[in-house]
């Protein structure tokens, strides 16, 4: 039986380089500034979280409640910057700032 699209995506995102490229593409799209762009970033983080063992495991690593983490990354989530930086750190990523060219 063929795998569903989301299963294939999650499998691909287990590769750290693929996950990084996916997350960077989502961050690039957030420059538009609209709510749909934030939803896209949160979706990317949710998918990477699933690929890295799921919300329960990441909640344990971040010290956040699983429900709070899930709510923060939901379609209408509005996570604190500390939640995002903590999550990014346990997933093996970090935010960096670069000057525009």
Image (cartoon, helix red, strand yellow):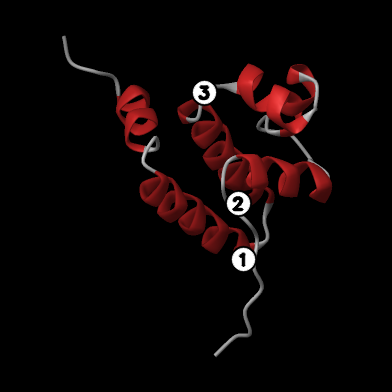
Q: Secondary structure at mark 3?
A: loop
Q: Residue at x 74, y 27 (%)?
A: 69
Q: Which of label 3 and label 2 is nearer to you?
A: 3
Q: Quadrant of the N terminus?
A: top left
Circle 2 packing at 10 Å, graded few (<14), some (14-19), many (20+), is some
Circle 1 packing at 10 Å, graded few (<14), some (14-19), many (20+), is few
Tag 2 or tag 1, which sits nearer the N-term? 1
Q: Secondary structure at mark 1?
A: helix
Q: Residue at x 50, y 33 (%)?
A: 47
**Which residue carries the number 3 mark?**
53
Marks 1/3 in contact by CB < 8 Å: the verdict is no
Q: Which of label 1 and label 3 is nearer to you?
A: 3
Whole-angstrom CA distance, mark 1 to mark 3, is 29 Å
**Which residue carries the number 2 mark?**
37
Q: Residue at x 36, y 48 (%)?
A: 18
Q: Secondary structure at mark 2?
A: helix
Marks 1/2 in contact by CB < 8 Å: the verdict is yes
Whole-angstrom CA distance, mark 1 to mark 2, is 8 Å
Q: On the rendered structure, is 19 left or right of 58?
A: left
Residue 29: image location, x then y, percent: 53, 59
Tag 2 or tag 3, which sits nearer the N-term? 2
The quadrant in which residue 14 appears is: top left
Residue 51: image location, x then y, percent: 46, 29
**Which residue carries the number 1 mark?**
31
Marks 3/2 in contact by CB < 8 Å: the verdict is no
Q: Quadrant of the C terminus?
A: bottom right
Q: Nearer the viewer, residue 67 or 62?
A: 62
Residue extending farthest to the bottom is: 101
Q: Nearer the viewer, residue 43 or 84?
A: 84
Task: Please tell me how many numbered marks the rendered image carries.
Answer: 3
Residue 90: image location, x then y, percent: 64, 40
């Amino acid at each position: 039986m063929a795998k569903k699209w989301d299963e294939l995506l999650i499998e691909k995102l287990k590769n750290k380089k693929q996950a990084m490229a996916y997350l960077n593409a989502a961050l690039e799209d957030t420059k538009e500034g609209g709510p749909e762009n934030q939803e896209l970033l949160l979706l990317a983080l949710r998918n990477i979280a699933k690929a890295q063992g799921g919300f329960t495991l990441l909640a344990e690593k971040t010290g956040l409640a699983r429900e709070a983490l899930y709510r923060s990354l939901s379609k209408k989530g509005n996570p604190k910057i500390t939640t995002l930086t903590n999550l990014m750190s346990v997933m093996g990523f970090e935010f960096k700032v670069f000057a525009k060219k």
